[in-house]
Amino acid sequence: MKKAFLIIIIFSIFTSCKTRKADTSLKLNNPIITDKYTADAAAIVHNNKVYLYAGHDQAPDDVNAYRMHEWLVYSSSDMIHWKEHPVPLKPTDFKWASGDAWAAQVIERNGKFYWYVTVTHGSIHGKAIGVAVSDSPTGPFVDALGKAIITNDMTTQTKISWDDIDPTVIVDDDGQAYLFWGNTLCKYAKLKENMIELDGPIKTIDLPNFTEAPWIHKKGDWYYLSYAFQFPEKIAYAMSKSVTGPWEFKGILNEVAGNSNTNHQAIINFKGKDYFIYHNGSIPTNGGSFRRSVCVDRLYYNPDGTMKRVIMTSEGIQE
Ligand code: FUB
């Protein structure tokens, strides 16, 4: 009788431990989107919401190459719950383009939303940058210029045809806007106030091991130029007191992201907190370098303005 009682007690302790384990409240919020493969995120804050723009990785499981036919837009009020909006833009919306929804960035100016995109040009060899415009952060967006703002033949420093990719834009405090972009070499140029024409020569910036994916942002008195460093990509960054440099290299900000040879970051401040947005290849079974997934983790600055190394997590943003 005593023995049976003991067995019942041990059994109930064992099952309650098991139940407690299964009842875990741990929420894994990265990647933030799991029903589609998403990459090359860019984000803006508008009216207390974050709008996140991403390329849609659509490569079938047996294809190891980029297959990207549209960009996607999501919004969130808390960086945890994301609402998908209808597809706002495709390379086919640019009559002069032949495809490839590569990295892009949206910026707001005077109530209009300008979306700078990488596509393949239909008649000029190589990648090109186009710009679309909308009155709303979720679109519909239309081609703002009717032609590319940057084409491969406008830059001749490198022989590759994909050196004019990955646009990022900032409007400086004095109202002057700048477009940065590049692969292998980081380039920049002033934009006219209309945001759709260059306003001066194309210049280059010397950054160690620059691969691609520049992202320009300002916090306090500092300008930050983060970018994909080496390959497989880490994210590194440089700082300056002026948007035109000189830039001081500050080292690695984010390590190689799991199961992806690209990393492509965006950096925002939302409701007083800083966020680092990137992609990895972590969706089980078929995730990888051509089926990527956008993730978000917190970003922290040191008192001297430098950025602390990002800690990539599966938990992501919890509150
Ligand atoms: O998604 C295609 C290309 O891969 C992007 O333009 C680069 O930044 C890299 O992420």
Image (spheres, rainbow, N blue to C red):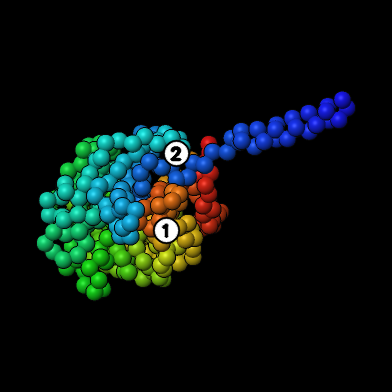
At x 26% / y 36%, what residue is drawn? 86
At x 38% / y 58%, what residue is drawn? 289
Which quarter of the rendered picture does the N terminus lie within?
top right
Res. 54 visible in picture: yes
Q: Does the beta carbon of the residue at mark 2 sit less than 8 Å from ligand 1?
A: no
Could you tell me residue 231's position as x and y percent? 41, 67
- Cα–Cα span, label 2 and label 1: 23 Å
Determine which of the numbered discs, if any, sits on residue 186 in the image. Answer: none
Element under label 2?
Answer: loop
Query: Is 108 or 57 nearer to us in this picture?
Result: 57
Circle 2: residue type:
Met
Could you tell me residue 104's position as x and y percent? 29, 52
Element under label 1?
Answer: loop
Res. 46 visible in picture: no
Q: Quadrant of residue 83?
A: top left
Could you tell me residue 155's position as x and y percent? 21, 69
- Residue pointed to by mark 1: 260
Determine which of the numbered discs, if any, sits on residue 79 in the image. Answer: 2
In this view, 266 is above or below 240: above
Circle 1: residue type:
Ser
Q: Give the class, few, some or many, for how many residues have Cα within 10 Å of label 1's Cα (few <14, many ≥20).
A: many
Q: Give the class, few, some or many, for how many residues have Cα within 10 Å of label 2's Cα (few <14, many ≥20).
A: many
In this view, 248 is above or below 315: below
The reply to whether the C-beta atoms of the residues labelled 2 and 1 are less than 8 Å apart is no
Could you tell me residue 177's position as x and y percent? 27, 53
At x 45% / y 39%, what residue is drawn? 79
Between disc 2 and disc 1, the foreground one is 1
- Among numbered discs 2 and 1, the one appearing first in the sequence: 2
Q: Is residue 117 left or right of residue 266?
A: left
